[in-house]
Image (spheres, rainbow, N blue to C red):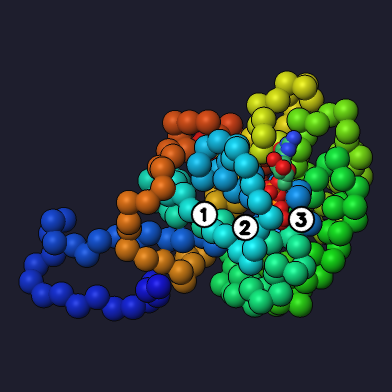
């Protein structure tokens, strides 16, 4: 992967036609939490735009990418979907904690144990030198299962406040669910909020020449109403 600081040699007069290609910044966001909370489904929903028909326990780490456009800049959002099961993570842990720009902690609102595990996930981040300077968010998934909720919003919000993270409640399966009164956040808006937050920070070191992978979303045009999704950080542009 090229560093943004690498030099480009050229001669002659620069015109718009012979300018070196603009570089596409990459935001590496790791998604962590217990096995079965829906990390694969959330990352798939954002990158592929739908709920996967079938998932299997992640082994090691998978990553998914999507090219988005924020305020006229194309940015590649790279989501690292990590294994929740201890036996599938051991060998990979050091790799996915490198050069991380943001962390998404996920719990399952219908599984109190997954919520109780959060301090251990936060601690693991700390042990890998990911401090509070790295933006972090908390996501409660499976809000479509309203009858089975074990973790209330108030408790989750308290936890999020204690750890200075914004809280989002959503459903990877049905992000527009009306079963919860339409209160759940859109998966789209959640990840775009993180991207906005990162974009508003200093330039990042990871970058690469633009390639044509992933769909492009133009924030000003579509689908990222932010709404509940910008609770703690605020968010500029179309978010
Ligand atoms: N009802 C409902 N089910 C979901 C939702 N998200 C995920 N699931 C289901 O939860 C199960 C686990 O989802 P995964 O995305 O594989 O979970 P994971 O966190 O990636 O699990 P590991 O890879 O083992 O760490 C699957 O059966 C999904 O279909 C959701 O929003 N609502």
- Provide the secondary structure element on which disc 1 rests: strand
Mark 3 lies within 8 Å of ligand 1 (Cβ measured): yes
Residue 81's label in the rendered image is 2
Front position in the image: 12 or 180 = 180
State which tag comes first along the sequence, 3 or 1.
Answer: 3
State which tag comes first along the sequence, 2 or 3.
Answer: 3
Q: Residue at x 52, y 54 (%)?
A: 64
Q: Position of residue 186 (x, y in %)?
A: 64, 35
Q: Where, by quadrant of the figure, is residue 128 drawn?
A: bottom right
Residue 35's label in the rendered image is 3
If the picture is divided into quarters, which one holds ligand 1? top right
State which tag comes first along the sequence, 2 or 1.
Answer: 1
Mark 2 lies within 8 Å of ligand 1 (Cβ measured): yes
* 201 lies left or right of 105: left
CB atoms of marks 2 and 1 within 8 Å: yes
Residue 64's label in the rendered image is 1
CB atoms of marks 3 and 1 within 8 Å: no
Residue 19, visible in the rendered structure: yes
Q: Residue at x 62, y 57 (%)?
A: 81
Q: Position of residue 152 (x, y in %)?
A: 90, 39
Q: Position of residue 25 (x, y in %)?
A: 43, 61
How far is mark 2 from mark 1, CA to CA?
A: 8 Å
Residue 130, visible in the rendered structure: no
Q: Where, by quadrant of the figure, is residue 44 drawn?
A: top right
């Amino acid at each position: 992967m090229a560093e943004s600081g690498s030099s480009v040699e050229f001669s002659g007069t620069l015109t718009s036609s012979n300018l070196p290609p603009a570089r596409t910044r990459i935001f590496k966001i790791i998604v962590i939490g217990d096995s079965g909370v829906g990390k694969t489904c959330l990352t798939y929903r954002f990158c592929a735009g739908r709920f996967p028909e079938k998932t299997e326990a992640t082994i090691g780490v998978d990553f998914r990418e999507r090219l988005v456009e924020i305020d006229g800049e194309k940015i590649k959002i790279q989501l690292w979907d990590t294994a929740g099961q201890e036996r599938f993570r051991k060998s990979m842990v050091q790799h996915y904690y490198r050069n991380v720009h943001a962390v998404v902690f996920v719990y399952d609102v219908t599984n109190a144990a997954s919520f109780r595990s959060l301090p251990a996930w936060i601690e693991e981040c700390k042990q890998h030198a990911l401090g509070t300077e790295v933006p972090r968010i908390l996501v409660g998934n499976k809000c479509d299962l309203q009858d089975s909720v074990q973790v209330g919003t108030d408790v989750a919000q308290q936890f999020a406040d204690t750890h200075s993270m914004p809280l989002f409640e959503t459903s990877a399966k049905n992000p527009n669910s009306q079963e919860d009164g339409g209160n759940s956040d859109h998966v789209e808006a959640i990840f775009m909020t993180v991207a906005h937050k990162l974009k508003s920070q200093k330039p990042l070191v990871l970058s690469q020449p633009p390639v044509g992978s992933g769909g492009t979303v133009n924030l000003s045009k579509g689908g990222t109403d932010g709404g509940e999704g910008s609770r703690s950080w605020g968010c500029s542009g179309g978010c």
